[in-house]
Amino acid sequence: MCGIAGIIDFTLSAEQRRSQLEGMVSLLDPRGPDARGVFDCEGISLGHTRLKILDLSDRAAQPMRGFDESLVLVFNGEIYNFPELAAELTAAGYTLSGSSDTEVILNGYHHWGSSVFERLNGMFAIAIYDKSEQKLVLARDRVGKKPLFYTQKENRFVFGSTLSAVRSVVVDAKLCPSAIREYFTTGYVSFSRSIFQDIEQVLPGEMLSISLANEGVGEIGFERYWEFPLPKAKNVSFEEESERLGDLLDEAVRTRLLSDRPLGLFLSGGLDSALISSLVRKHKKDQIHAFCCSFAESEYSELPEAKRSAEELGLDLHSVLCPQPTKEAVQEMVSGMGTPLGDSSYFPMHWLCKEAKKKVAVVLSGDGADELFAGYDTYYATKLSENLLINNPLSRIFLRAVGRLLGVSDKKMGFEYRLAAFRRALIYPFPGRHYMWRAMLESKRLRAVLSAECFEGSDELISGKSFLALSGKLKALPKFAAARAIDFHTWLSGDILPKVDLSSMAHGLEVRSPFLDYRIVEASAGMPDEFLRKGKTGKRILRHIAKDIVSARVLEGPKQGFNAPVPQWFRGELAEYARETFARSEELSEGMLLSAPLVELLEDHQQRKVDAGYFLWAVLVLLLWLEIHAQ
């Protein structure tokens, strides 16, 4: 795992270009604290910061050159099937000097060309300078576990692992009003956009090719090498599919145990991490460090359940207490956040990763299971919303009245909060409704705190060509299949995976997610709804696989969710700091966030007139991020 960066600019001197690149690379040092490298050649500078995981020698150093320097590669990630690919290359006559996946990618590109990306099983963001073909090639893994931002303006192209690194050399970058609207709707920005107008992301499963002929930067060529598969009817029994999925998951865990550095686990009280931990214990008999986040607010802590799972599996469990959100703690978190993300669970995740790195360099996690196997309550909400007795104007009025009677509580994702989210999303047609289950605030209140500029061109909270195009493809699919595709393209790639990457790489920690092996993603996409949910209970097929290796206590327990108690924090520790920051919101946000309505919303939250804690957290994070990384 590493950080990568590059600048193509034939108008700058080598010294100017190198100076800019060094600035980008310095921002990526936490991602790769073990080594740093730079390559310069004819208008091109490539940089790399290295976190040593496999082949700790300098033979795996980057940028890696090969074939008389006709190919130069920088790579962030981990390839789990590289031993098999290395064997194929050796049989084809290639000589590999080390035992790293980096060398396999470089030689694989020489042998197979850009089709090498289809052969890789892992997480990656890759840039290859192909001198003989006069082009730069970028590629990102199928699921989007590793980020890759870029910008092109006139005769200049810049890319990097984080938005902050790219933004550091794009001094005139302006905020994108519609992306700001999306961020404050759900807490993240999805698809290829970023919060800045001219900085985009390489999509998961996408390859970019940039021509460098005649000492210039040509147009970008876009190519999809993988698509999230739509379900196809197949005649297979639940038992057969369970056995197949169980074998794939066991293989995914086994291949992710390869490391030359200490390896551990993230362990919560739920099914996903317990199942992964059980499979790790099957293959790894020595000491295993496991890490669980706890809270002073006991309702949010999963430590008691994690302790039981650790005892059953013989794991060495380390409890990490999430600190209180002091001004200093929040600023430390945002300072290490390479891309702004409004998810409140980023805060405890930051501290969990920080403590885990003191013991290990690699951890396995259970991320992805809820999105692939319909584990969230939002899937039940989608099914419930199809009932005409519930989804009609009179029912929405009734639900609003019930919400007012219930008031606002401090319970973890309490019934009152979920009822409000359910009612807000009902006005949208499916599949947009499923996306809007995660909206953080009432539409009327959101429009009050954002400038009119954020709604120019579209008065809808759901917008963007990418989302509309996806929605068109999904309308004819079974509901759970369409809902999972929405989550895959938005919530998973826009929130969950950036959260894991950013919080872990801020401390030089590698996180591996067996559920997101692309073969498991493809298998899950083809499953009928009845394999995934039974009534209100999700992940039916995973529970079946786990029944012989995970305790009944975990299998039958309710889904907890990983949330921070930010609604309470904004009625206590965070309130004054938030008020001070919100007073400068227009200055920090190019006038898009209005100070007076924000302060009023904070006061309404404190007085329990509204539950806006998660929205207020997203606001605070973005304003601090802009102050630290973009001023």
Image (spheres, helix red, strand yellow):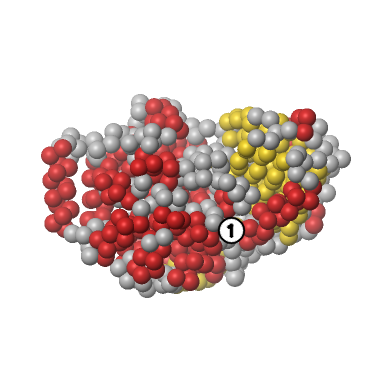
If the image is split into quadrants, where does the C terminus sit?
bottom right
Placement of 398 over or under 503, stated as above or below: above
In the figure, is residue 156 to the left or right of 629? right
Q: Residues within 10 Å of mark 1 (few under 14, many from 20)?
A: many
| Image x and y of residue 355, in percent | 54, 69
Placement of 111 over or under 602, stated as above or below: above
Quarter occupied by residue 578: bottom left
If the image is split into quadrants, where does the N terminus sit?
bottom right
| Image x and y of residue 451, in percent | 36, 46
- Marks counted in the figure total 1
| Image x and y of residue 331, in percent | 49, 66
Amino acid on which the number 1 mark rests in the picture? Met
In the figure, is residue 570 to the left or right of 88? left
Q: Residue furthest right?
A: 68
Q: Residue at x 45, y 64 (%)?
A: 348
Placement of 288 over or under 53, stated as above or below: below
The answer to whether one can see residue 513 in this image is yes
Q: Residue at x 39, y 27 (%)?
A: 472
Quarter occupied by residue 482: top left
Pick whichever, 332 or 125, lies toward us: 332
Placement of 603 over or under 94, stated as above or below: below
Q: Secondary structure at mark 1?
A: helix
Q: Residue at x 31, y 38 (%)?
A: 433
In the figure, is residue 465 to the left or right of 29? left
In the figure, is residue 106 to the left or right of 383? right
* Residue to which mark 1 is pinned: 505
The answer to whether one can see residue 103 in this image is no
Pick whichever, 251 or 127, lies toward us: 127
Pick whichever, 511 or 421, lies toward us: 421
| Image x and y of residue 531, in percent | 37, 39
